[in-house]
Amino acid sequence: MFNSFLGDTTEVYNEFNRIFNKFNAAGVTDVAVDLRYNGGGYVTVQEKLANYLAPAAANGGVMMNQEFNDKYASSFNETYNFSKLGPLNLNRVFFIVSPNTASASELLINNLKPYMDVKLVGPDHSYGKPVGYFPIPVGDWYIFPVSFRSTNKAGQGNYFNGFAVDSQQPDGLDKDWGDINETAFGSVVKYVGTGSFTRTTEIPGAPAGMVTPQLINANQSLDVKSFKGAVLSTKKVH
């Protein structure tokens, strides 16, 4: 479960290292990343997590392209490549998403898609923000004008309507993180074991249509006034 790409980056990177070393020692072959409430944050933190999740074959390949308008493209357009971290070599990764999954979270998903089997589970499509910005100080405040868009190795990057899920599963608000009986995560566990996601009829007491307006409203209420963005904190100047 990863709720933000913001925070103390040293602490976050140390935790990534600890977790992925643990995964490798345990012989993990499938990873589910829960981004259902993650509105984004630092692009550099996304890079770090992408390099842990990417398969060995992605090493050296294009991770993302940052593209600016025609006035700034020649000076600021930039390509970032994968630099694989850790020995974990996955062929597939699962992401649990919701309409609260935005920006740097979607960037991570998009960057991995050309290199591995990426499957999405959750109550509805992701937020839809394939753009990012730089913090510009103005007195005691910062402003964040949209500055660039990002595309992956395949040139894909216009997901303004968000990413559709492979399996629509309600947000199990009554369960803890990592509980295999929580509907979204439980469906991932079922897929790993059987090759198919949980169906509505397999969920005891599941509402008709599974994802009701009440569940959507409850999910959105957990995201009130949260940050949504992909932020580059520094940029070369020409």
Image (cartoon, rainbow, N blue to C red):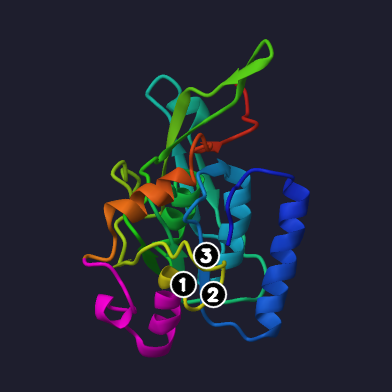
- Disc 2 marks a residue whose amino acid type is Asp
- Disc 2 on helix, strand or loop? loop
Where residue 236 appears, as percent x and y from the top left, is 63, 28
Disc 3 marks which residue?
A: 33
Binning the other alpha carbons within 10 Å of mark 1 as few (below 14), some (14 to 19) or many (20 upward) gives: some
Seen from the viewer's position, the closer of residues 187 and 83 is 187
| Res 59 quadrant in image | bottom right
- Disc 1 on helix, strand or loop? loop
The magenta region covers 186-208
**Left of 109 or right of it: where is 7?**
right
Proximity of marks 1 and 2: CB atoms separated by less than 8 Å: yes
- Disc 1 marks a residue whose amino acid type is Glu
Give the distance between the C-alpha atoms of the residues marked 2 and 3, in whole angstroms.
14 Å
Q: Going 72% across and 74% down the picture, which residue do you hit? A: 21
Where residue 1 appears, as percent x and y from the top left, is 58, 62
Binning the other alpha carbons within 10 Å of mark 3 as few (below 14), some (14 to 19) or many (20 upward) gives: some
Residue 182 badge: 1
Residue 179 badge: 2
Proximity of marks 2 and 3: CB atoms separated by less than 8 Å: no
- Disc 3 marks a residue whose amino acid type is Val
| Res 140 quadrant in image | top right
Seen from the viewer's position, the closer of residues 44 and 3 is 3
Where residue 90 appears, as percent x and y from the top left, is 52, 76
Q: Going 47% across and 27% down the picture, which residue do you hit? A: 147
Seen from the viewer's position, the closer of residues 173 and 27 is 173
Q: Going 41% across and 71% down the picture, which residue do you hit? A: 183
Look at the picture and state if 172 lies above or below 130. below
